[in-house]
Image (cartoon, rainbow, N blue to C red):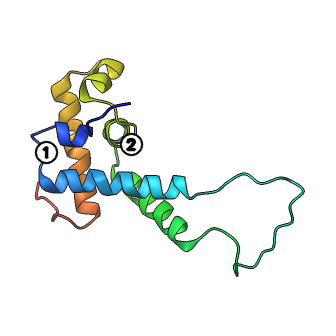
């Protein structure tokens, strides 16, 4: 396991890019940590939400993460953001896995983090 957060190790990232990556990670961890848990088939399920069901905070985190994933748009951008932000891979490891150059991976990551920052309202849409 890595001791250094890959987002901190990439010095060329802006504050908004780091914050967007961290928020993406937080939503993912919140949704998966407190998410659905398996239950025995014999257990009865009550359809009411009072005292049961999936907590709203988990549902909201899942929705937020799903919306952010959709904002990433392109599969190569999404793959770079997912492997570096969520899986903790280094840029070097992702570049070796995909066969891309490190500079290409950093560019894909920056594009993805910019898209997330716009999605989260941390930065305005860019012209062009």
Badge 1 marks a residue whose secondary structure is loop
Counting from the top left corner in percent of width and height, residue 48 is at: 75, 79
- For the image, the number of numbered tags is 2
Counting from the top left corner in percent of width and height, residue 87 is at: 40, 37
Residue 37 vertical placement versus 44 (above, below): above
Other residues around mark 1 within 10 Å, as few (<14) / some (14–19) / many (≥20): some
Disc 2: which residue = 86
Q: Nearer the N terminus, badge 1 or badge 2? A: 1
In what quadrant of the picture does the N terminus appear?
Answer: top left
Counting from the top left corner in percent of width and height, residue 12 is at: 9, 40
Counting from the top left corner in percent of width and height, residue 118 is at: 23, 61
Disc 1: which residue = 13
Q: Which residue is nearer to you in this view: 108 or 34?
A: 34
Q: Residue at x 78, y 75 (%)?
A: 47
Question: Which numbered circle lies on residue 55?
Answer: none
In what quadrant of the picture does the C terminus appear?
Answer: bottom left
Q: Quadrant of residue 77?
A: top left
Other residues around mark 2 within 10 Å, as few (<14) / some (14–19) / many (≥20): some
Q: Which residue is nearer to you in this view: 66 or 86?
A: 86
Residue 111 vertical placement versus 100 (above, below): below
Q: Residue at x 55, y 73 (%)?
A: 56
């Amino acid at each position: 396991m890595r001791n250094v957060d890959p987002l901190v190790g990439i010095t060329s990232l802006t504050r908004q890019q780091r914050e967007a990556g961290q928020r993406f990670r937080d939503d993912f961890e919140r949704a998966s940590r407190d998410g659905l848990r398996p239950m025995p088939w014999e257990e009865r399920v009550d359809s009411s939400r009072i005292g049961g069901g999936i907590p709203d905070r988990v549902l909201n985190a899942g929705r937020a993460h799903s919306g952010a994933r959709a904002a990433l748009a392109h599969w190569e951008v999404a793959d770079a953001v997912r492997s570096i932000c969520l899986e903790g891979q280094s840029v070097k490891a992702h570049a070796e896995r995909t066969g891309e150059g490190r500079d290409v991976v950093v560019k894909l990551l920056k594009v993805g983090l910019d898209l997330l920052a716009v999605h989260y309202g941390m930065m305005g849409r860019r012209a062009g």
